[in-house]
Image (cartoon, grey):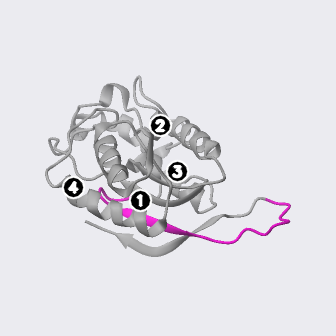
Amino acid sequence: MVVCCIARHPSVTVRPGICYGHLDVPLAEKWEDFAARLIRALRQTGVTRLYASPLSRCRIPAEYSAAIAGISVCLDPRLAELDFGTWEGQLWNDMPRAELDRWAADLMDFAPPEGESGRVLCERVTAFHADLPSEETCAILSHGGPLRVLQSLVEGRAPDLSRPALPSGEILTFSPVTQPEAAEQPVRTERPSRRVYRL
């Protein structure tokens, strides 16, 4: 399956400074404005399926947009945000400074207490990407963490957890390139376009 569009969910209603990776927090008002832009991107890229995280900040706009665009929607838990364990629901400013420093120094293998590491995130998102069927085009609606990994994979690069996360409500489209018929080595099947939809 060729990934033609990726998007980060719109803004949510949550106390500023709260860690809410796996928490199911509500969407902020006017999320339909984001959905309208996503629908335009789905139609312009001609995708046949929209994959989304099952968390409601992705699920609700995904189901709404897919219904209007006339495409199928598939919820996949591998697209959920990083599980921050006992940090979930806590203020970032209240986190132990030493733990945050350890995380910053080891983005791949550090894991918050009872949470998951960046390596686990990369493994599940990479597995999702590898499982996409090859005969269709799709769009993906997810979160900052998974999209860091996914954008690198779509661009034909190794996942980079240090790359800036897409802002909430941002939509990127990708243009397919022709794959040589007799290619013996894996080749990139997409390249980023310059089209960016912002809030």
The local secondary structure at tag 4 comes to helix
| Mark 4 residue type | Glu
Q: Is 173 part of what is drawn in magenta?
A: yes
**Spot occupied by residue 47 in the image (x, y as percentages of width and height):** 49, 59
Q: CA distance from mark 4 to mark 3?
A: 26 Å
- Name, please, the residue furthest toward the front: 70
Pointer 4 or 3: first along the chain? 4
Q: In the image, which is nearer the foreground, mark 3 or mark 1?
A: 3
Q: Main SS type for the magenta part?
A: loop
Q: Which residue is mark 2?
A: 76
**Rendered image: mark on residue 149:** 3
Range of magenta residues: 165-185
* Picture residue at 50% right of the left edge, 74% below the top: 193
Q: Which residue is mark 1?
A: 164
How busy is the neighbourhood of tag 4: few (under 14 within 10 Å), some, or many (20 plus)?
Answer: some
| Mark 1 residue type | Pro
Query: Can I make out residue 83 in this image?
Result: yes
* Picture residue at 16% right of the left edge, 44% below the top: 13
| Mark 2 residue type | Asp
Pointer 2 or 4: first along the chain? 4
The local secondary structure at tag 1 comes to loop
Residue 191 relative to residue 49: left or right: right
- Please tell me in which quadrant of the rendered image residue 84 appears: top left
Q: Which residue is mark 4?
A: 32
Q: CA distance from mark 3 to mark 2?
A: 15 Å
**Spot occupied by residue 172 in the image (x, y as percentages of width and height):** 43, 65
Name the residue nearer the viewer: 170 or 160: 170
Pointer 1 or 4: first along the chain? 4
Q: In the image, which is nearer the foreground, mark 1 or mark 2?
A: 2
